[in-house]
Image (tube, rainbow, N blue to C red):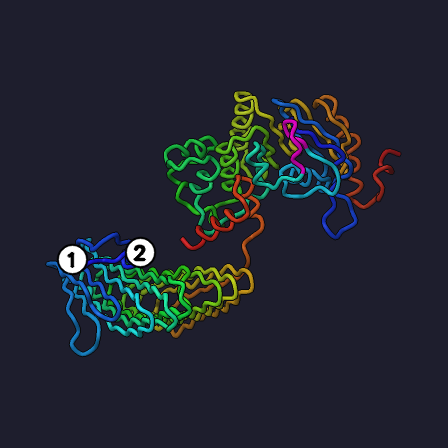
Amino acid sequence: MLELKGITYKIPGEEKEIIKGVDLTFEQGKFYAITGPNGSGKTSLAKVIMGIYKPTTGSITFKGEDITALEIHERSKKGIGYAFQYPPRFKGLRVLDLLQLSSGIDERKAVRGYLRQVGLCPEDYMDRDADASLSGGEMKRIEISTLLAKNPEFTIYDEPDAGVDLWSFDLLLNVIKQKHEKEGLTTVLISHQERILSLVDEIILIVGGKIQDIGTKDRIWPIIKDVVGCQWYKVCRGDIEDEADCRR
Amino acid sequence: MKLTAVDKKILQEVASMHDVPQGAYNIRKDGEGVSRQSTENIEIRVKTDNPGIDIIVKPGTKNESVHIPVLVTKTGINDLVYNTFEIGEGADVTVVAGCGIHNSGSEETRHDGIHTIYVRKGARLRYVEKHYGEGGGAGGKILNPKTVIEIEEGGMAELELVQIRGVDHTERVTEANLYKNASLIMVERLLTDGNQMAKSDVVVNLLGEDSFTQVTSRTVAQGDSEQIFYPRVIAHARSRGYVECDSIIMDRAKVRSVPEIAAYHAEAELTHEAAIGKIAGEQMLKLMSLGLSEKEAVEKILEGFLR
């Protein structure tokens, strides 16, 4: 459904590659997780797919069409969605405005259900500005509700658990999974949570900007624990500079 | 009174009026009062000493409104008007003021409105003033409003002052005196573009115990325009005040924002915030990820910010 070929990404003006030659295919209707250490390139990869970052090399096709040159809004209209890890706040734009923009529906009543789905009472939130008066967890739930309203065929949720309390986390996961199954969507969750990794069909393990492995949890989890876990620990502690040292 | 298409457009912009309103109103056009209507509770009298009107709202009048739009449609006019509002004790009314200039000529067109407002004991006033300019002539469109408002014990006023594009030069002066338990909420929304210039000077004196004010300005400066804000809240008694100036700056515009708070009483609580910045990149990306083009995203963000 969505295919990346030879994708590299460098921050403009910098030498270091954040994404290094990624080849990856997302199949229609599958549920994926992207995981890996902090700074491994998970969010950068998602932003490359959404068009927020322009790849330095490589191409992206979506449903057989080359979308590499398309802008963010054009990719959105094609059916690609991205829930931000840290949703931006808006002074003056209400939660209702965001839901109306997402769904394309002006009728107030019709968009209330998207808030209920993420566990927020519509009448308490619709007319509030999506600004700093909302907590991080509230903004995160509103962010996910905008994606439910938008209903893209291919959606990446960037750390949907971040800042969300345990009770809401269960609810959000269920909503995302049910929607995925019911509508046959292609869904990608960026996460470090074992619970999320247990839910998906395939886990994409990314380390240092490269795809290290792809597979089910049974296959990937030991690698995360034994190899990547070691790297995370040692690299963080400053014991090693080269990831290869970890394997010795 | 027969309204031209230009008149109707201006009335729509400054007073959301499609035609002559039902309640009390006064329409001033090109320096003269052209149509006026009083009601049982709201009397509009022509001043005898100066150009302008007195608007007298009877004590206890509830849920009524008065429209007093000003239309300036000829080039070269220099209109000065003095309006006085008397909002009687316990009344609760809305005043929709506003001025629109259509200048398609080469001479400068100007309107200076001097408004004095008395909000008597326990009265509530919602006052909306919109400024609007149009016309492709080389002549400038200038609006210089001055509003002086006295709010007596327990009175409350909300001032909504709006100027979205079209006015080349404006210097707004707002002075407020608040007595015991009085409150004033003032919101100024402004967008300037091209070579426009806007200056706003606000002074709120918290004179009475437990008086309260909140002064907010939300502005957008585009093109080569310039904006200057001097909102000041001065507490002379146990009182509370809050000033917030928030501006989005774009292109080559210039914005100066100088909020000031001064306390002359140990139990005064005053705070201020001021921020000037461009549109946040993340906001743009979020809206574009929902399917808006870059231009549509900018418009949506500005529309919300100035709402």
The residue that disc 2 covers is: B9
Residues tagged by mark 1 and mark 2 found on one chain of the structure: yes
- Badge 2 marks a residue whose secondary structure is helix
Residue found at the far right of this picture = A248
Q: Identify which residue is drawn at 51% across, 51% down.
A: B298
- Horizontal side of A124 relative to B123 (left or right) equals right
User: Which chain does the residue under circle 2 lie in?
Assistant: B
User: Which chain does the residue under circle 1 lie in?
Assistant: B
Mark 1: which amino acid?
A: Thr
Q: Nearer the viewer, residue B61 or B219?
A: B219
- Horizontal side of B112 relative to B170 (left or right) equals left
Q: Where is residue A141 in the image (x, y as percent from the top left)?
A: 51, 37
The residue that disc 1 covers is: B61
Residue found at the far left of this picture = B40
- Location of residue B181 (image quadrant): bottom left
Q: Give the range drawn in magenta.
A: A61-68
Is residue A71 rendered magenta in the image? Answer: no
Q: Identify which residue is drawn at 60% across, 28% down.
A: A187
Q: Earlier in the sequence, mark 1 or mark 2?
A: 2
Mark 2: which amino acid?
A: Lys
